[in-house]
């Protein structure tokens, strides 16, 4: 896995923080540069963060996991449609 450095303005920041798959830094060029320097200068930190990021992608975003989420969305949609049809 590849560790990332993101700012809070990036939509992925909450996920990055949740799983520790990277660094979330203030939204300035200086802070971004510092975050990159930190990762570049610490191979063990890079490896640990990269491993957590890989695990997240394998478990939460694999084809099987995404397909299961979509199937559940379809099931819920069908339930709503059936319930609405009964009350119509």
Image (tube, rainbow, N blue to C red):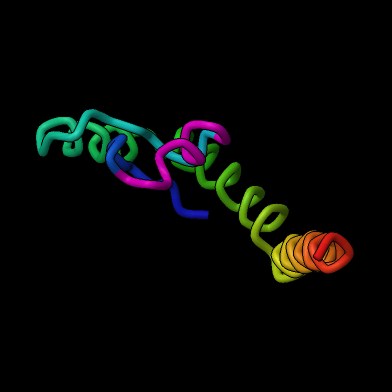
Where is residue 7 drawn, in percent x and y?
A: 28, 38
Q: Residue at x 34, y 38 (%)?
A: 39
Please say whether residue 45 is one of the residues in the magenta stretch: no
Position of the C terminus, as image quadrant, is bottom right
Magenta region's main secondary structure? helix
Horizontal and vertical percent position of residue 2 = 46, 53
Task: Answer whether residue 18 is magenta in the image.
Answer: yes
Left of 82 or right of it: where is 60?
left
Q: Quadrant of residue 73?
A: bottom right
Kindly tell me whether residue 24 is visible in this rendering.
yes
| Residue drawn at (17%, 30%) of the image | 31
Give above or below for 66 relative to 14: below
Q: Residue at x 79, y 62 (%)?
A: 84
Determine the residue positioned at 47% across, 39% down. Answer: 16
> Is residue 68 visible in this depiction of the protein?
no
Q: Quadrant of residue 69?
A: bottom right
Q: Percent from the top left, x then y, of residue 14?
A: 46, 36
**In the image, residue 13 above or below residue 87:** above
Determine the residue located farthest toward the front in the rendered image.
Answer: 88
User: Quick one: 45 or 81, which is closer to the camera?
Assistant: 81
Write down the quadrant of residue 51 in the picture.
Answer: top right
Q: Nearer the viewer, residue 69 or 86?
A: 86
Task: Please indicate whether residue 28 sits to the left or right of residue 49 in the image.
Answer: left
Residue 28: x %, y % from top left = 13, 34
Tally of numbered discs? 0
| Residues rendered magenta in the picture | 10-19
């Amino acid at each position: 896995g590849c560790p990332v450095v993101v700012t809070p303005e990036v939509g992925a920041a909450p996920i990055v923080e949740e799983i520790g798959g990277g660094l979330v830094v203030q939204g300035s060029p200086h802070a971004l540069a510092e975050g990159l320097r930190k990762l570049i200068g610490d191979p063990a930190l890079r490896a640990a963060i990269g491993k957590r990021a890989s695990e997240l992608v394998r478990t939460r975003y694999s084809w099987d996991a995404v397909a299961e989420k979509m199937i559940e969305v379809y099931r819920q949609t069908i339930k709503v449609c059936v319930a609405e049809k009964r009350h119509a």
